Image (cartoon, rainbow, N blue to C red):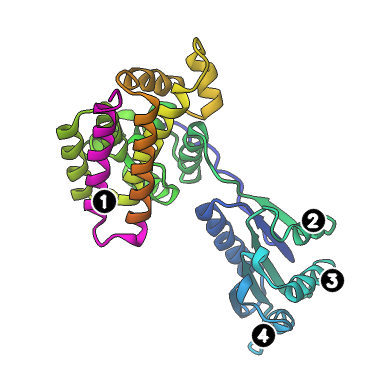
Amino acid sequence: MPARPPAPAAVTAAPVTLVVGEEEFLVDRAVRELIAAARAGQEGDAGDVHDRDGAGLAPGELDWLTSPSLFGGGSVVVIRSAQNASKDVTAELTRYLSRPAEDAVLILTHAGGAKGKDLLAAAKTTKAQILERPKLTRFAERLDFIKSEFRRLGRSADDAAARALLDAVGSDLRELAAACDQLAADEQDRVDETVVARYYRGRAESTGFSVADRAVEGHLVPALEQLRWALATGVSPVLICSALAQGVRLLGRVSSAPRGASSMSLAAEVGAPPWKIDAVKRQLRGWQARGIARALHAVAEADAQVKGEASSADYALERAVRRIVASRADAAG
């Protein structure tokens, strides 16, 4: 058996840690790891763990939360979305950063944007530990995430395996992490494209990306077949809608690119691999700008519907697929 690759370094507890970023799964994981590290480092009985949302934290509550536990051990306090804290609470948090309690561990999450930027700036002037967890938006970043997940689990995977898993499962990091966990548990050797295909062949053929490809190519019946099979095999409607949106947006971005622009340069600009740009160029045949605009409107409506505005997400997706195909068919009209 080949040597196992080194796992990514684990986080360590500090008196104050800010987890900064909008990638919800990675932020949540960092918080869980920090809590575990803090409790592991406590002597005797572990103290209390308090988990609060920044918007709901009342003035003066921080002092109580960071006080020693009545049952021994220091407390672990998690304040999520600290950028949403009130002005008075933000002032308390800022003061706390420079004088943290001896027996407490404070973990703050912060979206990293302009809101609450003073708190973030104050943290950078203290000894607070700052963990960056930015949004993964590029195709290559998700491939790196998959390979990193396998390293965490003591396995290795190449680009082909990571690409196959991304095609099969979709871009949701929670689902990707769960898939990596399953494969690592069941496979003792290196995970390659063949292994991924064996586990996910049925699903890989019916992901939201397959639905999107058939729809933007104008193939209504195959698109609907892929949609119904994807839903039947448990693919999330939100992921399917995201794939439809990505497919139509890529049409718009590639179609508006300067004539003669290479696939490599476009790939760097839009954050998709060159092979995908080549595929989109082929899909663009038969489309016009006004048709793409109508298709974008269709997926925007579907996105709102699958997230709660419609009683049936399945119907909303089917309607979106039909409208995308129709937008291509009468784009010249």
Which one is in front in this view, the residue at disc 1 or the one at disc 2?
Answer: 1
Point out the tag, 4 or 1, that comes first from the N-terminus: 4
Q: Does residue 189 appear anywhere in the picture?
A: no
Q: Is residue 3 left or right of residue 318?
A: right
Q: Amino acid at mark 1?
A: Ala
Which disc number belongs to residue 69?
A: 4
- From what the image shows, is residue 158 above or below residue 127? above
Which disc number belongs to residue 158?
A: none
Task: Look at the numbered disc 2 and give the secondary structure of its residue.
Answer: helix
Point out the tag, 1 or 3, that comes first from the N-terminus: 3
Which one is in front in this view, the residue at disc 4 or the one at disc 3?
Answer: 3
Q: Which residue is mark 1?
A: 316
* Residue 8 quadrant: top right
Which disc number belongs to residue 99?
A: 3
Foreground of the two, 257 or 270: 257
The span shown in magenta is 307-333
Which one is in front in this view, the residue at disc 4 or the one at disc 1?
Answer: 1
Q: Quadrant of the N terminus?
A: top left
- From what the image shows, is residue 263 above or below residue 93? above
Q: Amino acid at mark 4?
A: Ser
Residue positioned most to the top: 260
Spatial CA span between label 4 and label 3: 19 Å
Task: Look at the numbered disc 3 and give the secondary structure of its residue.
Answer: loop
Spatial CA span between label 2 and label 3: 16 Å
Q: Does residue 115 appear anywhere in the picture?
A: yes
